[in-house]
Image: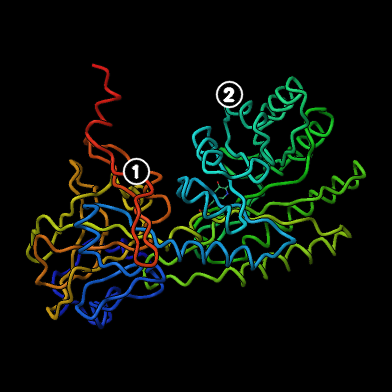
Amino acid sequence: MSRSAHPAGPRHADVLPEGHYFAPPADLNALDPKVWAHTVGRNADGVVAVGGIDVKALAEQFGTPAYFIDEADFRARARAWRTAFGPGADVFYAGKAFLSRAVVRWLYEEGLNLDVCSGGELATALSGGMPADRIAFHGNNKSTEEITRAIESGVGRIVLDSFQEIVRVAHIASSLRRRQRVQIRVTVGVEAHTHEFIATAHEDQKFGIPLADGQAAEAVRRALQLEGLEVIGIHSHIGSQIFDMSGFEVAAHRVVGLLKDIRDEHGIELPEIDLGGGLGIAYTSDDDPREPHEIAKALTEIVSRECEAARLRTPRISVEPGRAIVGPTAFTLYEVGTIKPLDGLRTYVSVDGGMSDNIRTALYDADYSVALVSRTSDAEPMLVRVVGKHCESGDIVVRDAFLPADLAPGDLLAVPATGAYCRSMASNYNHVLRPPVVAVNDGEARVIVRRETQEDLLRLDVG
Ligand SMILES: *Cc1c(COP(=O)(O)O)cnc(C)c1O
C-alpha cells in the first residue's frame, strides 16, 4: 500500500494507532543499505559520508542543494548489468535517467551502450566519447535534424516509432546514401507498474506501433521494402519501476509471436529483440528490487523458451535499464531552513530545494526516504513532510517520513535514490538555479555538472 494514500496522521510516533501502516523505524540514525549508495555510511562522529568524504565537508565545498553521485557504485552497478547479460547480449543505459559526459565515459569504460532520445542527448553522448555505433536513438517524434544527425554520425540503431517515421528515416538515409540499422518499436498490450501488470489487446499510449490488428506486421512489411533501412529487430518497453517479471513474459511471448509471423511471411528471422528497461529500485525500505543477474536469467530464459516453442533461432537480446543503474547511486543534500509544527497533523520541514530538483513526488506521487545526515540524534521520532521552497503547495519532496524531534534549521538532510529522473527533469521554476552534480570517489569529489548561476539564467533572457 502506498503511504501517500494516508495523507493525514499524528505528529508524534507515540500517538500512532496500533498496527499503523507507517511506523517509525526502530533506529532513526540507521541507513538502510537498500536505499543508499554503496559507499554511504556514518562516521564515528555520526556524520554521514560518501566515497570517504563527509556531508558537512561536501556542503561547505559545493553548497546545497546538490546531488552527490557515488562513482564506484555507479560503475559497479553498470558492470553488474554488463556481466549478468554477458557477451551474447547488449545493455543500453537509458540516458534520459541522467546523462552527463562523465557518465558517458563511465559507461563506455564499463562496456555499456547508450540510449538517447533527443538531439541534446545525442550531442552529450558523442561529446562524452561514446562511439556512435554503441548509441541507439529513440523517441516518438524525432525531428528531421535529429534523424539526419543520428544517421550522419553513424548511430548503431534508430528505433522507429510510427508509420510516418519509417518512411521519413528511410528517405533521409537514402538521400545520405546510407542504409540505417533500425528496430521497430511495438506496443504489445502490456501495461506494467511496480507489482502488477495488465495485459490487453490495445494500449492507449503514444509510443510504438500496436501489435493489435496486424499493425506491427504491416510496419515490418513496409520497412523491409525500403532501401534506406536494415531492419534488425523488434523493440518493446513495457513500463517503469517494475518488480514483477511476469509482464516481460507476456511481452516476450507476443514479440516472439511477431518474429514467427515475420519468418513465415518473409522467410527471414530478425536477429535482435530489445525488451526495454523499467526495472525497479528501492526508494524506501518497503521496496525489494531484483539483482541484475536474476533479471538477466529470467529474461534470457523467457526468450529462449518462447523461441524454442516457435522454432526460431534465439535472437540477440538487448535491455535498457536507466533507473536501475543510476537511481540508487546518488542522493540529494539539502539544508533545513524552517520547521513548522501543525498541531495534531504533522511537522512541515522546509529545505532549500524542492520540486525544481525533484519533480517525481509531485508528478508521480513517488515515495522517497529522508535522513538527518549532519549528526545523529537520540530524540523521539516526529512525523514530518519535507517540502521545498517553491510557491506551490504541491511542492513536496518526501510526503511522509520520520525525523528526530530535535531537528533544527541548519541541519543537513539527504534524500537517497535521487540519481534517476531528478537532475534530468530539473527545472528553473521560480527562477531557482539547478543544483550541481558532484561525483565522489575514493576521497575525491569533483563537479561533473556545475551549479547554475544567475548569469546563466539572465543569459537566456535577452531583454
Ligand atoms: C524510459 C525508458 C527506458 C528506461 O527506463 P527505466 O525505468 O529508467 O529503466 C528504457 N527504454 C525506453 C524505450 C524508455 O523509454
Mark linked to residue 426 = 1
Q: Residue at x 34, y 50 (%)?
A: 447
The residue nearer to you, when weighing 69 against 8, is 69
**What amino acid is found at the position of numbered circle 1 in the picture?**
Ala
Viewer-proximal residue among 381 and 336: 336
Proximity of marks 1 and 2: CB atoms separated by less than 8 Å: no
Seen in the picture, residue 462 relative to 97 is either above or below; the reply is above
**In the picture provided, is 447 more to the left or to the right than 194?**
left
Asked which secondary structure carries label 1, the reply is: loop
Residue 353, position in %: x, y?
22, 49
Label of residue 247 in the image = none
Q: Quadrant of the C terminus?
A: top left
Residue lying furthest top: 463
Q: Is residue 462 above or below residue 455?
A: above
Q: Position of residue 200 (x, y in %)?
A: 63, 52
* Amino acid residing under circle 2: Glu
